Image: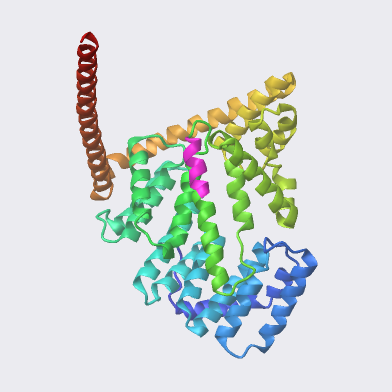
Amino acid sequence: MSRFHSLHPVAAIRSLARIIIALAVIFAVAAGTAANAMDRATKDLLYRKYASQLENAALARDSLRILYNMFDLSSRQGQLTHSWEILHTAVNANDINAQLDMLRTLATFNAGNDSIIDLLLRHTDAIPNKAARESTRTYILNQYFARKNRQINNPEIQAVLLDSIMKSHDLKGHDIYDEISVIYQIIQFLGVDAEGVLFRQSLDTYEALIEKLSMSDFPLKSQFLTTVALIHSRLHGDQAKAVQADRNMLALMKELEDMYRKQNRPHRDYDINRFISYRRMLSNFEGLSSRELEEVHDSILILCDKNPDLQSAIRRDGHPSGFYHMARHEYDKALPLLKDLADAPFLTSYQRQKYYRMIMDASKNTGDRQAYVDALEKFIRSSMEIDSIRDNAAKKESILRDSILHTPLLTNVANQNRTAVRRSSHTAVTLMAVSTVIALLLLLYIYLYVRLRLKKSRR
């Protein structure tokens, strides 16, 4: 990453903010948004109202509250612009929480930009609150590494990158945020199609570390849930675990919305994030009950009905009702929708493989031979791509396994898991022994009772 040696991070951010603040109104007024169930005209009217209030705001903290409302009413592009403006204003207001919030937001928007990530990390390092600083630094590094890992296809280059990051933390577990950062990077490095011992052990460690975090670390919890949902959403993945991860994600979104309402951010919502979780849940319909299938599908329809951005996304990426009809064995309705879904540009190879498998099943049940042949050809092609990905994952795991598999960070959690299993086994054996004794006593009681009754009957 490049270095800004000549500028203090706050000064650099202010400089950058001044250049782009002027674009905020242009981007945000023209933008659609997920904010609340209101039409475009109402949102634009509200945005203009806040823009007018901003001109008359005397204090930085007043400007900050207004800017957050404008941010929540903006599209992604508008939010990107307002993020810099909010960060600049939060520095003036000495609001550390708002600074950290925008540092994470900007890292999400700019994860592939070395210079901006470097600037954000330097600003984060200047935050005086150590726990909050380290949590945000970990989030930023995780976002950066995940994006960079997708950009670099050579496993050897990936190994060098991962090795350089691991050396800074040495895997000795000095800090939980360092541990989470390393584990997250190992999982991203190996990829969601990895199946080796190191990958499974890293995933167990990741979960154990996240469970130790408080609600204030919700960005890291959200990263974890998204990672788990994606890992288990592949064709032969554990769909029940994927669905549970998204259930937990939806519950987290509700908690966050309640939190933001208390912070006087009435327009902050997670409709687009909810849609993503609901869509993924529908694609994992085997992990849903019949009742939950209907509830998830109804929720998607309600979200899409009120949100122009989601309507655009469906026109571009296909309608998730294809999964719903597939789950209900309504193959004639599912087939055309699944074809659109499988052609969406954002899909990974393993997602396409899963969708082609559904199309093959639907076309077989509708007698559409041509659709079956087309899907089979694409399924084979995607399967070959996945085989190549898994081969690379195995090679990458081989590179890492000998050096890190037995480090304290990984073995401590493994030992804890084994201890828990032993305790569970001991408890099960004890319960079995007690149950056996009770059963024998019951049989003895029945035997004596029957014998006594027979003696009385003979008399």
The image quadrant where one finds the N terminus is bottom left
Q: Main secondary structure of the magenta part?
A: helix
Say if 197 sits above or below 247 in the image. Answer: above
Magenta span of residues: 238-247
Judging depth in this view, the residue of 114 and 422 nearest the camera is: 422
Q: Residue at 61%, 66% (x, y): give it.
A: 268
Q: Is residue 345 visible?
A: no
Above or below — where is 74 with respect to 374?
Answer: below
Which color scheme is applied?
rainbow
Position of 297 compared to 336: left or right? left
In the image, residue 245 lies in the stretch drawn in magenta: yes
Frontmost residue, 427 versus 372: 427
Percent position of residue 146, x then y: 47, 52
Image quadrant containing the C terminus: top left
Q: Position of residue 266 (x, y in %)?
A: 63, 70
Q: Quick check: 440 left or right of 391? A: left
Q: Quadrant of residue 136?
A: bottom left
Residue 143 visible in the shown view? yes
Count how many numbered circles sit on residues in the image.
Answer: 0
In this view, the residue farthest toward the right is 41
* In the rendered image, the vertical position of residue 311 relative to residue 400, given as above or below: below
Q: Residue furthest front?
A: 459
Q: Toward the viewer: 37 or 401?
A: 37
Q: Position of residue 326 (x, y in %)?
A: 66, 31
- Tell me: 84 left or right of 326: left
250 or 369, nearer to the observer: 250
Residue that sits furthest to the top in the current view:
458
Residue pictured at 25% horizontal, 42% vertical: 420
- Residue 43's x, y, as percent? 74, 69
